[in-house]
Image (cartoon, rainbow, N blue to C red):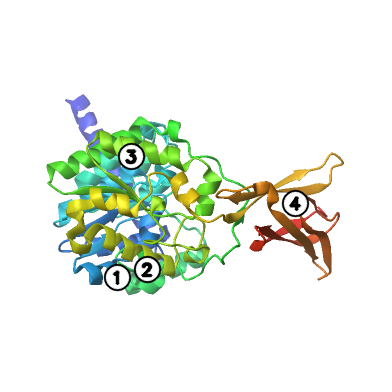
Amino acid sequence: MKGVERKFVFIFKFIIFCIGFYLLNLIFAFVLKNDSTSYTRIIFHELHQQKNIDVLICGASHVSHDFYPAQADKILGMNTFCSGTPSQPIDATYAVIQEAVSQCPVKHIFLEMDFAVANGVVFKNRDGLRTNYLVSEYLNNKKVKFNYLKDASAPNLYLNSLLPLGKEKFIDLNPISIVKNFRSKLTGQYYKYDYSSAENYVGKGCVMRTDIIENGTYYSDGEKPIAVKDIGDDYKNTVRKIVSFCEQNKIPLTFFAMPCSDFYLAEKGNYDEYYNFVKDFTASMGYEYYDFNLCKEEHLYLEDCDFWDDNHLAKTGIIKFTKAFCDFFYENNAYDDLAHKKSDWFYDSYSQKTNAQPERLYGLELKKSRASDGSAQIKIIPLINHGDSSTVAYEVSAELKDSKTIVIQQKSANDTISLPTNAEGKIKISAWFNGKCLNHVEEYFNTSL
């Protein structure tokens, strides 16, 4: 009997320890977890207030930065909502859809097929879940949350996932932040879900940036092609789960893509490969795919200044795209005849779209390197839609830290620029194409290190 008693006492103590440990986690998480400025927290709070959703836009950051529900509501006379969060993985999107449907009627779901989250990640091989936790922390449906976290990783991350306090769970150890966060929660300010706490958030899942890319100023150090062949089974199977879930719940599902800048897609260099993959993949499940990167300019014309970076829209672009979205899918009950309307609105490929444009210089790639003598130089690669790239000419100067300006090159097709030695400042490049100055960039350099 004593042995049985010891086991009982041990089990009892273990249970008490687990409860105490969990409660201690809750207390520390309450104090240390700082998500007061997260727009994701406000998105989920608003989502849980919805009594019905006519149009639910799902996906990653393109969803929150590219669509304006307040505008769409006025145009359509419907209740629209965006549920995108930064770098939202496809299994997180599936969890969000289940969460929304479990709490209110949802009439139509639009799934945005952003290639940035269509990758070859094997869920069980994940060694970090920060973007997953960004969603799981705000799920109210316990079953959805449990299944989501269980399938999101291997068992070695289960404990971290289940505990309130854990790695990648937005813990802030800055003493000043701790005091402000604690005060905000004790006074109740934290629970008011004030929009002003989340910069640029305008409600119903929309983040509206007013800063813009000036026309003709795009540049970067290059992008890797879209790894279409690496898109894995976990991604594809999760999309199939979304399809199955929507069909079981009799909710219409539409696959689409929001627009990126032509500069960004030109950098990738293989957008048609990705488009064909998604088009064939959705067709295999019996669905059409509508990609607004292929939209004809008479229906949606976007300039550099309609973006705040190379793949997220600024305020003017959001307003343009939201109207185009509503016009395409809903004008005159268009959804009943989208197959016919698609040919009028969209090109058959991205290359067909860019070939239909006048010759354009989208921007410049600047590749830093060393010459044979060890001096610093920049190789300029122009990104154009079509035409002869060798005819692009460059004017180059350097504005040094002491405000002195050095002319490095008059207008010339030379695309390899040597930087001033032992100097610091800005390199300024103006690019000319077809007799017009179409791009001007400024890049910091320091060759004195």
Q: Do tag 1 and tag 2 residues touch (Cβ < 8 Å)?
A: yes
Q: Which residue is mark 3?
A: 279
Residue 35 screen position, x and y as percent: 40, 61
Of marks 2 and 4, the one in the foreground: 4
Task: Mark 3 or mark 4: name the one nearer the start of the chain.
Answer: 3
Please indicate, yes or no, whether residue 317 appears anywhere in the rendered image: yes
- In the figure, is residue 246 to the left or right of 323? left
Task: Residue at 23% x, 51% y: name it.
Answer: 338
Q: Which residue is mark 4?
A: 413
Of marks 1 and 4, the one in the foreground: 4
Q: Quadrant of residue 312?
A: bottom left
Residue 173 screen position, x and y as percent: 50, 58
Q: Secondary structure at mark 4?
A: loop
Q: Secondary structure at mark 2?
A: helix
- The residue carrying pointer 1 sits among few (fewer than 14), some (14 to 19) or many (20 or more) residues within 10 Å by Cα, namely some
Q: Which residue is mark 1?
A: 71
